Amino acid sequence: MERPEIEPFEEDMFLNTERRCPVIILQDTSASMRGWIHQVNAGLEDLKEDLSQDALASQRVEIAVVSFGPVQLVQDFVTVDQWLPPALTASGSTPMGEALLFAVEQLRLRKRAYREAGIPYYRPWIWLVTDGAPTDDWRGALDTVHAERRRGGLELFTIGTDQADFGVLKEISDPRPPVRLRQAKYREMFVWLSQSLKPVSKADPGSQVDLGDPGSWGEVKT
Amino acid sequence: MWTWAGAKNKGGIHGEDEECQDALTVRKAGQVLIACVSDGAGSAECSHIGADLACTVVAENFEAMAEIEPDPGLWQMSELRAVANRAAESIKLHAESEGNPVSAYHATIVACALGPIGSAYLQVGDGAIVTEEKEGFEVRFWPEQTEYANTSHFVTGPDVENHIEAFVSKTSPGFACLFSDGIQYLVLHQKEQRPHDKFFERVKAQMPERPGVSPTADMWLQAMLQSDQVCKRTDDDTAIVVIKRVA
């Protein structure tokens, strides 16, 4: 059969309904990070660059950057195409518990804003990166974080350097094991995060994101 | 009488060696036009089989029901709900025979049976059926809300009874469009919960006045699903069936 001439499809035939995937980079910026913070900043640039290469992901993924030491919203949620990665500086202690509670609250506010605007969204991610041990009452935050995770309110990933307290990270990210960052490969880690954010498969509401092997940058600490 | 067309397209989310996980079926049983679209879960490895099975079981059951009662407007709601349960049962049996968990076959259902007088509709999970009524285009069941855009309930789910939507109508529309959630966000206004008229007007205009399947409209729908306008807005699988009443 002869293929009919098909006129171009008009743009206004389709809606531009945004779907958002909110991600909080919860980055340890305590004093012990001084030697590595430039790597983290380069990694954030790589994250933007890699996500920007995917047209859908660059409009879908919204990044917020929260640093702890002290806890600070460095960058509120913004789509990748609008994002200017910050230059973080390292100083202070490691208030990880306060940072987790702050991140959970930021996600709650963001989801409320989506709902009010009628914007569909994906399950939010918290990507916690640390090189040490908490200096605050981190156990006090566990109930809130775990309750939110159990009801399916977030996906929490924890990444630690060799010096990180993996006993603490295991408790925080339970049941998902933490990942040990190899040789300060922050840049590779952020590119991997970008690749993991691109595919968003359909699943039943109770399912957990299944991330692949971190490969060269990390080792899963079971 | 009816004219109909359908198409599906593998989303950009899939690799080269992966299959489209959406399925569609259109059958004619006497004067009743039966259509079903099913969306297999991206997270489930055999969901394309689950989606195919769901479409087949729904279509076969609707055919059998049309033989007994040729006006779908007189079908019982309980019968419609039982069709969803039978689809789930068939998929479960298949999963068992293959030694796989039923969750590997997760699939949704969006289906209708349009007769000369009345019509019947069945849905489990997201995707939608838009019909043209006296007041304009309407969504039969607003896609069931889960909190997240990439999650849905499935006919294979543990609590399917809570997620079956069934409806019979004494009237039958002049136009119906069934689609999976891949294009749902492109053609339904989320906040106002209404169809995007421009899309459905354009789709309807492609349908000929001759009864039967329309290969030309099939090709148009395929080109539409593969167009930049669709693919830059979604990387999900897409499937659509369009039905129009003709003299």
Image (cartoon, coloured by chain):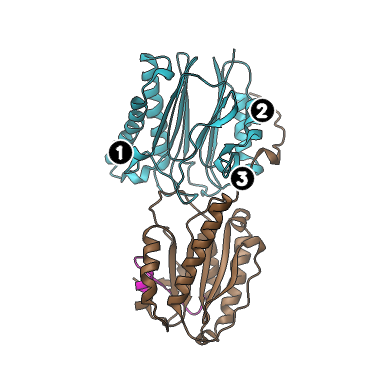
Hey, what amino acid is under mark 3?
Cys
Q: Is residue A131 above or below residue A62?
A: below
Tint of chain B: cyan
Q: Which lettered chain is shown in brown?
A: A
> Residue B65 at x, y = what percent?
37, 19
Numbered badge on residue B10 = none
Q: Which residue is mark 3?
A: B231
* Residue B25 rendering spot, x and y as whole percentages: 47, 28
Amino acid residing under circle 1: Lys
Are callouts 1 and 2 both on one chain?
Answer: no
Nearest to N terminus: mark 3 or mark 1: 1
Residue underneath mark 2? A3
The answer to whether residue A109 is magenta is: no
- Tell me the CA gap for discs 3 and 1: 33 Å
Marks 2 and 3 share the same chain: no
Q: Name the image quarter holding residue B157.
A: top left
Residue nearer the viewer, A7 or A205:
A205
Which region is colored magenta?
A170-185
Instruction: Give me the chain letter of mark 2.
Output: A
Residue under label 1, please give it. B92
- Which quadrant, please, contains the N terminus of chain A? top right
In front of the other: A108 or B106: A108
Residue drawn 50% across the image and 54% down it: A122
Marks 3 and 1: CB-CB under 8 Å?
A: no
